Image: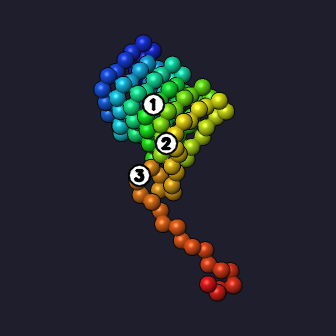
Amino acid sequence: MIAPGMKIVGDVETSGILKIEGTVQGSIRGARQVMLGRSGVIQGDVQAEEVILGGRVVGTVTATERVEIQANSVIEGDVHTRSIVVFEGGLLNGNVRMDMAGAKGVSTPVTPLRNAGGAD
């Protein structure tokens, strides 16, 4: 937990759950879940399985499973994920990349559909 008023300068690496109500100036990597509270700020990239954003992020957000952008959240950067939810009022200023393999950088090949009559 990074409480309100706390400021971390440098990268954070964890395999657990990280809740941020303060400020992180650096990247976050390896977390199972990152929860950014309304008063929280991240100035750097975020890589986790699931990311729930209620505050402000300036950087790329990568989640292998899911990203949730809550109503008061502001994201200035790209999002790479398998699934995304953006609540009304949430702002996302960047590109969104979604693919079937998640955000692991592996693309799933698309198999063309065959004609139902058997002729191609």
Between disc 1 and disc 2, whose residue precedes? 1
User: What is the three-letter code of the residue carrying label 2?
Assistant: Val
Instruction: Pinpoint residue 1: horizontal percent, then vertical percent.
Output: 41, 22
**Type of amino acid at the residue the image marks with label 3:** Lys
Q: Residue at x 56, y 28 (%)?
A: 73
Asked if residue 118 lies left or right of residue 49, the reply is: right
Residue picked out by circle 3: 104
Q: CA distance from mark 3 to mark 1?
A: 21 Å
Label 1 CA crowd tier, 10 Å (few <14, some 14–19, many 20+): some
Q: Nearer the viewer, residue 64 or 26?
A: 26
User: Does 76 sit above or below residue 111?
Assistant: above
Q: Return the x and y of residue 44 as percentages of the image width and height.
A: 39, 31
Q: Earlier in the sequence, mark 3 or mark 1?
A: 1
Tell me the crowding category of disc 3: few under 14, some 14 to 19, or many 20 or more residues within 10 angstroms, Cα based. Answer: some
Residue 104 in the figure: left or right of residue 69: left
When the figure is inspected, residue 9 is found, relative to residue 63, above or below; the finding is above
Mark 2–mark 3 contact, CB under 8 Å? no
Secondary structure type for disc 3: loop
Image coords of residue 48 (percent x, y) = 42, 40
Question: What residue does disc 2 label?
Answer: 79
x and y, in percent, of residue 112 in the image: 57, 73
Badge 2 marks a residue whose secondary structure is strand
The answer to whether residue 27 is above or below residue 5 is: below
Residue at 65% in and 30% down: 89
Q: CA distance from mark 1 to mark 2?
A: 11 Å
**Image quarter of the C terminus:** bottom right
Q: Is residue 39 visible?
A: yes
Q: Determine which residue is flagged by label 1.
A: 58
Can residue 32 be seen here? no
